[in-house]
Amino acid sequence: MSDKYWVGFDLGGTKMLATVFDSEFKPCGRERKKTKGHAGSETGVVRISKTIRDALADAEIDVGQVAGIGVGFAGPLDLEKGVLFEAPNLGWTDVPLKDLLENDFACPVVVANDVDAGVFGEYKFGAARGARCAIGIFPGTGIGGGCVYNGTILSGKNRSCMEIGHIEVNPAGPRCGCGQIGCLEAVASRLAVAAAAAQAVYRGQAPALMKIAGSDLSNIRSGALAQAIEEGDSVIETFLRTAARHVGVAIATVVHLLAPDIVVLGGGLVEALPALYVETATAAANERVLPSFVDTFQVKAAELGDDATVTGAAAWANAVVGTA
Ligand SMILES: [Zn+2]
């Protein structure tokens, strides 16, 4: 019973996931809840605490056995103080989550950006194990990015960085959610690909996808896109390859700046079509980099899936707090 356990917490816009890990980082209990739009921060923090306690109950672990809690948060935050600046889906501003959880659980709490935590998870246990410089790129509704350099999450002074989704890749491109024109995520996110696919269905250019998902954007998920390509919708494959090429162009920029040895691509679209996506992005990146950088980096599909953030957050807490 003297074993220590670590808790990873993934606080996303629509879901929260807590996972308990043993000292070898094997998962031994978990709990998932929806992130509902409660008004007021206390309700949200109570909900987070309850999710962690339910995961501990699932693992049959006492609160006193927890060595530390790592939280990956999908929004702007103060890394040092562990304050969440904005969590619109929870109706929050300026929540001192680190202090609140430390008081509640009487153990150290480390708060990180969720994508950074995910890349750290891939670095410790997934596709980027042993990398000197690991870059993670996760195309979803937007495109998240993170970097683990020499075993540490690369960050600015008290702020998360690697906003790769807002690298300009097409000056004539559409307007991004951030207000600028031609950002990577405006042309290559899963949402951008799905929106183009919905138009193609509407125009009668994607008969397989029409049968699988129809033209309603909310039904056009990664699996449906993959199945449509398999069933011969060449226009959908073109959209996917175009998106992956844009990601490759962004990778080339990152290669020039940081010379990563491993670039991990994750998210539902990459998981549904790993070979197609990785090969296309690799080729585009190699076409674009200076000759001395060609083939100096490996592009790989992520291995931890939805568990990347909880695993990485727990491991990052362990790295920051130490095992003492
Ligand atoms: Zn942008």
Image (cartoon, helix red, strand yellow):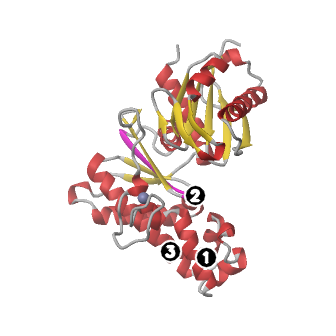
Q: Is residue 119 left or right of residue 106?
A: left
- The CA span between labels 1 and 3 is 11 Å
x and y, in percent, of residue 80 in the image: 45, 27
* Residue under the image location 48 percent in, 60 percent down: 177
- The CA span between labels 3 and 2 is 16 Å
Q: Is residue 296 left or right of residue 31?
A: left
Q: Secondary structure at mark 1?
A: helix
Q: Which residue has dot 3 on it?
A: 239
* Residue under the image location 59 percent in, 86 percent down: 205
Which residue type carries mark 1? Ala
Tell me which segment is drawn in magenta.
132-141
Residue 297 in view: yes
Quarter of the image where one finds residue 66: top right
Name the mark nearer the viewer: 1 or 3: 1
x and y, in percent, of residue 14 in the image: 66, 49
Which residue type carries mark 3? Phe
What numbered label is drawn on residue 271? 2
